[in-house]
Image (cartoon, grey):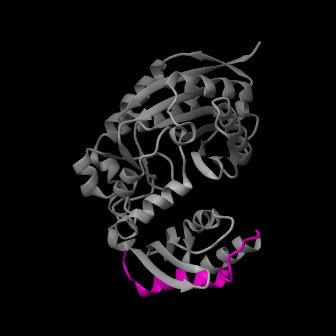
Amino acid sequence: MATVWRWLDTGIRPAAQNMALNRALLEAQQQGESPCTVRLLGFEPAVLLGFHQSVEQEVNQAYCAEQGIAVQRRITGGGAIYMDENQMGWELYASKQAMGTAQMSDIAARLCHAVAGGLRTLGVNAVFRPRNDIEVDGRKISGTGGAFDGDALMYQGTLLLRLNVETMLNALRIPAEKLADKAVVSARERVTSLETVLGIVPERDVVVTALREALAKALDVEFVEQGLTAQETARYEIALREMEQPDWVHMIQTPASDRPVLTASKRFPAGTLRVNVALDTRQQRIRQVWFSGDVFISPRRTLIDLESQLRDVLLERMEDVVQAFFSSRTVDMLGLTPMDISGLLMQACTTQEVA
C-alpha cells in the first residue's frame, strides 16, 4: 500500500496569506500536527523580500504603490523576487524521516528531477541544473530552494507560466533605468516560460496533473486532496494577523544609501563589458551583480552563472571567487581574462558611480 500524502491547492491569494500559510504549515509539520504535504499556490502581484532584507534597499516602493503591487516578507532567506498570477508555486512539507535524508542537495535533485520530468510530459525539454534550478535549453523555468526547521522540511519552487519581465524589473530596485531595453533582453536570455516554449499556456489543470503525477512517482506516495487541519488553521490566523502589519514587512530598516547600485564599464578586445553591483557598504559585501554589454563569451550563460556565484560574497573575497569560478570550467572569452572581470568589479565598487 502506497504512503498517503496530502495534496493541498490553496489557489491565488494575497502575499500575506501565502506567507502566513508557509509559517503555519511549517510550524505544524515541526510539531507533528500535519501530514506530509505538497501545496500548490499562486500570488496576487507582490514583491517578496527575503527574511533578512529591507524594503528600502530592495523595492521600488513608488512603482509598487502606483501599480498596486504588495510588498511582503518571507519566513526564509534569499533575495527579493516578484510574483504574480503568471507563476505557479509548489511547496513540499515533510519530515526528514519521510524524505529519507537530511541532505538538501539530495532533496533538491530528487524534487527537481521529478518536476522536470512532469514538464517533459507537456512537451517541454526541461532538465534539472544543480544546485536547484530547472531549465529549458539553458534558460531557467523554475527556481527552487528549501529550509529545515528542526526535523521539518519546507521545499519551494516557482514555475513560470508566462514572462512579465518589465514589471519585475520595475518592481525591484535594480539598475533597470540605465540598462533600459538591454535589461529586458538580458532577462529574457536568462529565463523562459511555458508560454515561450509551447506557444501557449496550458490549462491549469493540465499543468497540475503533470506535476502531481511526477511528484507522486518520485516520492512513491499517493496524494489525497485535503484542506487545512484545525491546528493549522489556528496557526495560520495567528501568523496572518502579524504578517498583515507594516511592522512585519518593515521589520528590518536599512537605508538604501547603505546598499548603492554601483556601475563601471570598459572596452575589451572581446567587446564592451558593463557591470552593476549592489554593494552593502557597511559589511563590504556584494549583494548582487548584473553583467551586460556586447562581449563575446562562450558558453553564453557564463556570466549568468558568475552572477550567482558572486551573490552575498565579501568584497575582499571577490577576486578569489572569480578566479575559482573560471578555474573550474572551460570558457572562450577572446582574450578577456578573469583578472579583467574582477578588476572591473573592483572599479565599480571603489569609484562609487551610482547607477
Residue name at image x 60 percent, y 51 percent: 139
Q: Nearer the viewer, residue 327 or 318?
A: 327
Q: Is residue 220 found left or right of 284 in the rendered image?
A: right
Q: Position of residue 11 (x, y in %)?
A: 43, 26
User: Residue 156 colored magenta?
Assistant: no
Q: Total label count?
A: 0
Q: Is residue 290 left or right of residue 322?
A: left
- State the image coordinates of residue 134 (x, y, percent, origin top left): 64, 45
In the image as oriented, which residue stretches furthest toward the front?
199
Q: Position of residue 155 (x, y in %)?
A: 60, 39
Quick check: can you spot residue 291? yes
Q: Is residue 36 visible?
A: no
Closest to the observer, 232 or 70:
70
Residue drawn at x 50%, y 48% is: 76
Q: Is residue 350 above or below residue 190?
A: below
What segment is highlighted magenta in the picture?
Answer: 329-355
- Give the quadrant of residue 39: top right
Quarter of the image where one finds residue 169: bottom left
Per the image, is 337 magenta?
Answer: yes
Q: Quadrant of residue 94?
A: top right
Quarter of the picture containing the N terminus is top right
For the C terminus, the quadrant is bottom left
Residue lying furthest left in this view?
Answer: 66
Residue at 43% x, 58% y: name it. 184
Q: Position of residue 160 (x, y in %)?
A: 51, 41
Decide which of 310, 34 is in the foreground and name it: 310
**Measured along the vertical axis of the image, is residue 323 above or below residue 110?**
below
- Residue at the spot 50% in from the left edge and 61% down from the top edge: 186
* Looking at the image, residue 4 lies above or below residue 201: above
Is the residue 162 above or below the residue 181 in the image?
Answer: above
Decide which of 262, 162 is in the foreground and name it. 162
